[in-house]
Amino acid sequence: MANPDKSSAAIAYVYRGTFVHSTQQTALQVQEDALLGVDTEGKIAFIGEGKKLEALSQVFQFSPSEVTQLTEHEFLMPGLVDTHIHACQYSYAGTALDLPLLQWLNTYTFPVESRFKDLEFARRVYTHVVVTRKHHNSCSKSYDFGQRALVGKVCMDRNDSVKHYRESIQESHDETCRFIKEFLDKKYPLAKPVVTPRFALSCSRELLEQLGKIAKNNNLHIQSHISENKEEIQLVKELFPESESYTDVYHKYNLLTDKTVMAHGCHLSDKELAVFKETGASLSHCPNSNFSLCSGVLNVRNVLKHKVKLGLGTDVAGGYSSSMLDAVRRTLDASKILTIQDPKHETLSFEEVFRLATLGGSQALSLDDQTGNFEVGKDFDALRVNVAAPGGPIDLIHSEGPKTLLEKFLNLGDDRNIVEVFVAGKKVVPFTEPKAE
C-alpha cells in the first residue's frame, strides 16, 4: 500500500500494471492494476492501487500522464539474486564436466585460474561475466555496469596440483587486507568485499583463523563451500580430526556468522543445520553444479524446515549455465528427484522456488533490508518481463492470468523476455557499455 510518510526525494518514474513478489509469509503475492513509484534515490516511494492514481499523484507530486503502463502480458518482479558464482571459471563454462569435484578442480579449475596473473586475460573474462550476468537478469558484479555485487579474493594456502597456484599464510593475509582496503576506499555504493576461504581443504588452520578475525574486525560478509561432495567431506575429517564435523571446522574459526553464505551443503546433517540456524549462516543451493559434478542432491525442504536462510546460485563453471532461470528450473528438478526417491517428500512449488530466487537470495546475503521484494523504502531492483515478447521463446495460445504468466516465464523464458532491468532504481538493461578510457 502507499506509504503515508511521504519521501523527501522527488518521484523519478511510476509504473502501473501487474507486480509479483514474495514476502516472508507469502511465497507469491500478485498485485494487479497497481501503481509503484520510484524516487530519485532509487527507492520504492509508494505502492498503491491503480484506481487511486489521482490521489497518489497529488500526494507524491507526479503527473498521471507520465505513468508507464505495462501491457497485458507484462509484469514487474524483483531481480533474481545469484548467491554463488566463480567469475574466474567463466571462460570454460559448458565444458569440463566429466569429473567429480576434487578431480575437476585439479584437472580444469586450478590450471585456468592460475592464468589470471595475466591482467589482460582477467579483464577480458571479467567483462564477459558482467555483461552476461546482466542479460541473465541477476544481481552480480561490477560497478561500471551498475550491478549490485559481493566480491571476494579467493584464499588458498594448500594446493599441490598446480605449481605456484597457492599463497603462503602471510601472503593470503596481506593480500586479503589490501583487497579489502582498496575496495572500501573506492566507496562503491552497490558493491562490497567478501572474505573468501576457498574451502577447508585448501586452507590451513592458521589461515582460517586469520580470515575469521579479518571478517570480524571489518564486519564483512564471508563466502565459501561446504559438504558438496562425499570424498571432500571425508578428507576434511582426516585433515581436521579435532573437529566434530565440516560445519564445526568453520564454526571453530568464527567463519559462520549472520553474514556468511556457504555453497552447496548437499550432505549436511540435521545437527549441522542447527548450527547454521543458531549462527544465522546461509546456504547457496547450486543444483546445476550438484548434478553436473555428481555431487549430491540438496534437500531444500529439510533446510527450510530447520529455518536456515537459503538462496539459489549458478556456481559457474561447475554449473554449466550462468542463467538464474536455469537455477530455478534445476531447483524444481532436484526437488522432484527427491520425491521420486521418497513419495512422502513434499515437492517444492514454483512459487516457493520463485521466493528462493528473489527474496531468499537477498536474505541469504543479508541484503533483505535493502532489496529482495517490493516494499516501500527498499531499493528498486526489478525486472520488467514481457512473456509475449516478439521473437521470444514463449507461445501464448489463449488468455492467461499473471500467475500462469510468471510460471511460463520461469519455465520457458530467457533474456528475450526481459524488457528492462533496474538496480537501485537505475535502468541497466537496455544499457550502453561504458566507453573505453
Image (cartoon, rainbow, N blue to C red):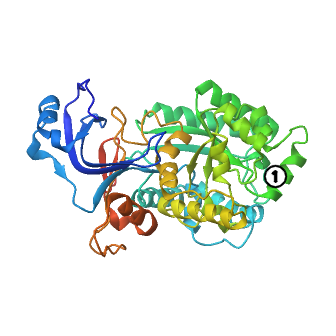
Quadrant of the image containing the N terminus: top left
In the foreground, 250 or 63: 63
Q: Is residue 268 left or right of residue 148?
A: right
Numbered marks: total: 1
In the foreground, 99 or 341: 341
**Residue occupying image coordinates x 75% and y 38%:** 250
In the foreground, 331 or 29: 29
Residue type (three-letter) at the residue carrying disc 1: Ile
Instruction: Give coordinates of residue 389: x percent, y percent.
Output: 28, 68
- The vertical placement of 414 against 374, above or below, is below
- The vertical placement of 247 against 181, above or below, is below
Q: Quadrant of residue 34?
A: top left
Instruction: Give coordinates of residue 287: x percent, y percent.
Output: 62, 60
**Residue occupying image coordinates x 36% and y 36%:** 375
Q: Which residue is mark 1?
A: 233
Instruction: Give coordinates of residue 299: x percent, y percent.
Output: 68, 54
Local packing at callout 1 (Cα closer than 10 Å; few below 14, some 14-19, many 20+) is some
Residue 395 can be seen, yes or no? yes
Q: Is residue 230 left or right of residue 211?
A: right
At mark 1, the secondary structure is helix
